[in-house]
Amino acid sequence: METLVEFSDLARHYGGRWAVRGLSLSIAGGEIFGLLGPNGAGKSTTLKMAATLLLPSSGRGRIAGYDLESQADEVRRRIGYVPEGAELYEVLTGGEFLDLVRDLHRLPEAEAQRRRAPLLDAFELYADLGRVIGDYSKGMKQKLLLIAALQHEPPVLLLDEPLDGLDVSAQEALKQVLRDRAAAGCAVVYSSHILEVVEKLCTRVAILAHGRLAALGSPRELAERLGGASLSEIFLRLTGGDAPPPAG
Amino acid sequence: MWTDPLLRALGADPEVFRPVYRVQKILLRRSVRLMRLRGRQTGSFALVCFLAGSYGLVGTVFLYRARVPVLGGGLALTCGCAYLLMIVLADHAEVLVLSGERLVLAAHPHDDRSLLLAKSVAVGRSLALLSACLFLPACLVVAHWWGARGVLGYLAGAAGAAFAAAASGVLFAVLLVRTGGKRAMERVMPWVQTAFQLTFFLPTAANVFFQPEQLSGFVRGLMAWLLPTFWFTAPLELAAGGAGAAAWGRLALAGGSVAGLAIAGRRLATGLGRRLLEPEPRTAPRGGRGALPAHGALGFLLRFEGLRLFSLLRVHLRSDWRTLSEVLSLPATGLLLLFLYARQGSGFGLLMRAFFFSWLLFLGADTLTRSQRPGSLWWLLSSPIDRTRFSLATISLLRLFLLVPLTAAVALMTLRQGLQAGEPWSQGLWGLAALVAWGDLLLLLGKAAYPEFPFSRGREGGMAGDRFALIFLGAAASGAVTAVLAVCRHFGAPGFALGALAAVLLHLPLSLWARRRTARAAERLDLVQLC
């Protein structure tokens, strides 16, 4: 499969602290790639750089062959991004928000309706599309963000804690949607704290610690190579203890 | 679409402009916090337009009374521009630099120029509608006195003044965001909101202070040159005929200010589109606020639970700008109203002072029970505090922040008027004592009427009838107190002394009643109620 996500020595620092440092990765279409790490390990920063929300301090990144910095708009056309913590226009209705995203991605109305319908069914959001987002629960906002990220069927999905706030049926629906998208050739980058889900869902994982890549491989490979009985054991062994290094 | 070539000529992408413009229009229409109805997440732009129309009518009355282009037109334009500026600062500027928009839009295809243009056009359209409501009513008077040429001149001046006011507001907001980030804007919002609420009294204030027909030539001259809105009356002056070099001078000032604002706007707008969606800089954590004084005058006045409540108030209000603006506006409104009615001398003025003094104290009790985020009090439910005492401490807090400043203001006015009118000192002092005693009773009554836990009631929740009940109850209670004080005044110092004594006697039963109701409300408080 074609490589859709490519980071080469990617780094980003905030003031005096490195959030991500020397990250090199490639993710092919068809993969569900887990990004793991403790709080502050650099997962969200990596996804924000991939989504063009943050400029890298150094290094390069490419999405579907387009450079994150010089071809940001081309990148945006090819990604679906779900940030951590649902940030939305609270006074728009769910339908109005989906229409905004549809139009920004230049998707014809009829085509958008056709693609949106199964997602609205799966996430049980049809009846609430006419309500203003400010009235939505946390889970409903997360569902809306997921539909907005999926409706234009991008080749790359960047999901930061996508299960946050979802009920069990929506979680299962999302997992199935992600498997289907991956089977259709989409690269899914999935950041999470929930190791059990990552272990079952992801074909490969990267474990980040203090902004650096600490391990990379399929859950089975990592278990064989690092000798842990489960992903949790490996995770704890790789990420425990040390203070983050200073920038510079 | 027919606009596409124009948009392309302006450097925007129509495919991005159109959806963003559509959404910005909706945001502007529904985000009008100033007119947000209870129980609804969205505001009503129609109400904002209606209010603009009433400001326009006030301006028309000024114009009619003044009968002179400079003074009348200047007052009408000042009235409209004050409203426009506040709307821009309170609502439109926030839509223009919406905090958190980066996470909504930045990862979708967009370009900076289309985004900025869509926002500017949406804001411009909304302001044009409001300007029409503000300035068109006065055209009738202008047409009556100065004919069609006058109307054209007035409209040209109004357009310039509206542009200048709106641009000043937008530039101020953009500068604020550029220097202090989007959070700086959130910190300024309560003060803007308070200032806006005070402009509601502008017509009354103008009516009391401005007798346009009685202003001296010197004052008129000063206003014409020192108030920028007066510069924009120059086209009307010229159209009305008989204007001299001064009109041309003001025209030059008006034109210069518009050009200056346009240039400044162009400079500030450079890169703004990009900046709107760029990440917020990660700033170092700010140093903690100073510890609260555990002893001293404040500690003594507030006592123990009061000090805790004060601490909660400080923490809570940092993230609840609407409640903060209401808390700020209570003493500010009170002082303004007292000052306004102080000029009306004895009799009616005194009664109105007593009425507003009492009414604001009553409203204070309700204000402190409201919050934008009642759910954030969940931690109090699991904390080992005496909920009843904690809730009752709002009375001490209101005494300190409302009763004391209002009493001080009334005392100053009483002193001034007493000295002028040669009233006996004893009557003034007893009158003040009676007012304070009855005011304190109203604080207790307000607490008994609204015994809910501080910040436990949602600001948007509840029924619309809630607000009317509050206004009705407050007006009835304040009216009763005013009537009592009017009777006392009839008997002079002994009457006021008796009135004060009666209030002291009523204090105990009323405080017991307030305490019982507060305790019941505190017991009933649970998470469901908060969320």
Image: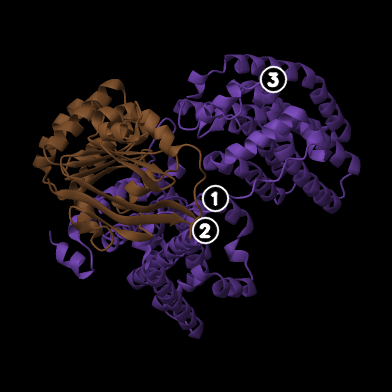
Chain colours: A brown, B purple
Q: Is residue B120 left or right of residue B520?
A: left
- The residue indicated by pointer 1 is B187
Check the image and report above or below for B202 versus B314. below
Residue B63 in view here: no
First reached walking from the N terminus: tag 1 or tag 2: 2
The front one of B403 and B135 is: B403
Q: Tell whether B23 sits left or right of B237.
A: left
Q: Nearer the viewer, residue B530 or B461?
A: B530
Q: Check chain identity for marks 3 and 2: say if they share one.
A: yes
Residue B436: x and y, percent? 78, 34
Q: Which label number is shown at residue B386?
A: 3
**Secondary structure under badge 3?**
loop
Upstream in sequence: badge 3 or badge 2: 2
Residue at (37, 55) in percent of width and height: A11
Q: Is A227 left, or right, of B444 in this rendering?
A: left
Q: How many neighbours does mark 3 have within 10 angstroms: few (below 14), some (14-19), or many (20 or more)?
A: few
Q: Amino acid at mark 1?
A: Arg
**Marks 1 and 2, how far apart at CA:** 10 Å
Decide: marks 1, 2 in contact (CB < 8 A)? yes
User: What residue is disc 2 on?
Assistant: B180
- State how far apart marks 3 and 2 are (Cα): 40 Å
Q: Amino acid at mark 2?
A: Gly
